[in-house]
Image (cartoon, rainbow, N blue to C red):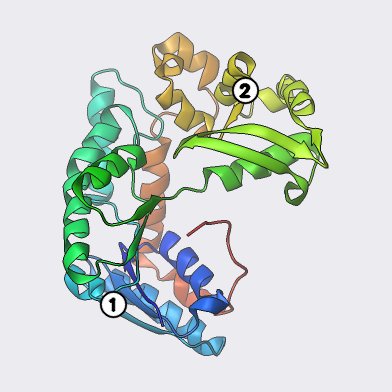
Amino acid sequence: MAKIAILGAGSITFGTILLNDMLGTESLNGSTYALMGPTLSKLQRVENFIKRLIKRNKLRADIYSTTNRREALRDADYVITILAIGGMESYKQDYEIPMKYGVDQCIGQCVGVGGVFRGIRTIPVMVDILHDMEELCPNALLLNYVNPMATISIAMGKSSGIPFIGLCHGIQTTLDLIACYTGVKKEEIDFLAAGINHMAWYLRLEKDGKDLYPLFKENIEKPEYYINDKVRCEVTRHFGYFMTESSGHLSEYLQWFRKNRKALKAYCDQPLFGGESGIGYRFHSGIAEKFKETDYLSYESGELKPRSAEYC
């Protein structure tokens, strides 16, 4: 059966979601999961939880932890990267240093100064992983969740012939929003989305062959809808299509929305991923702090959950 190496597997939330999905995939029964990361205690916390999941649900799977990347990669069929080079301390600098000079970021992961910082420290590691794969698992597929996605994808494509896919959940989660705004169940929406990762566009929205865009565009003009997604709604006004990432993300991709205090007040004044300054760092560091002292996974029931919306 398949061997699946997960690099950055100490991720308490994201790593466990992906593992739950794979354990619930019948075609992966009997697979081996190699959890790799720099901190063995974090890996073992995830490993122990997954072992309970396997035992409780009578699944066929093997799982082990290692801090040795080459050991994890050896003979792998799939490699999943969910790592964060530099951790929360580096992410803090990605936000605070630009802010010191007046560059206000919401997420600071994919573009702008924060994206450049993250790319500089992450690209060499991703390229090293590819070179290890060329030697240890040349036929494996790399599934990457690491940002800055577009920049890393360009670097990987120029550095190796190992096949890879860049993944995000923007399309799935935005479809939930569109379903809410149109009053149509997402399972009933036929859509075409295209673009690059972290900036794809819904080119078609239909139900039973009927165009949903007129209703969607009418509703986003209503104050109670517009206020939830100011930047995306504003861009839709001008270009006719809705984008797959939050207004906080898009305000960085089209930085006219964050160019001065007046623009920030007009378009980025909503909390959290509506445009709030520094929420990317504070959100993720809050999760890290929450799990630092307490093993919340030990309180989980051990029941296998339904597959998530992730494409991995």
Query: Camera-side residue: 146 or 207?
Result: 207
Residue that mark 1 sits on: 65
Residue assigned mark 2: 233
Label 2: how many residues lie within 10 Å, few (<14), some (14-19) or many (20+)? many
- Image coords of residue 157 (percent x, y): 27, 45
Let me know if residue 68 appears in the view. no
Of callouts 2 and 1, which one flags the residue occurring earlier in the amino acid sequence? 1
Q: Amino acid at mark 2?
A: Cys
Label 2 with label 1: CB-CB less than 8 Å: no
Q: Badge 1: how crowded within 10 Å, few (<14), some, or many (20+)?
A: many
Horizontally, residue 148 falls left or right of residue 101, namely: right
Left or right of 105, for residue 202: right
Q: Say if residue 32 shows up in the picture.
A: yes
* Residue at left offset 34%, top offset 49%: 146
Determine the residue positioned at 74% across, 51% down: 187
Task: Check residue 219 in the rendering and tell me which mark sits there, or answer none.
Answer: none
Type of amino acid under label 1:
Ser
Q: Locate residue 112, reporting x and y percent.
A: 31, 27
Res. 57 image quadrant:
bottom right
Q: Is residue 273 above or below residue 232?
A: below
Residue 249 screen position, x and y as percent = 46, 32
Q: Residue at x 59, y 17 (%)?
A: 239
Dividing the picture into quadrants, the one containing residue 26 is bottom right
Query: Toward the viewer: 117 or 277?
Result: 117
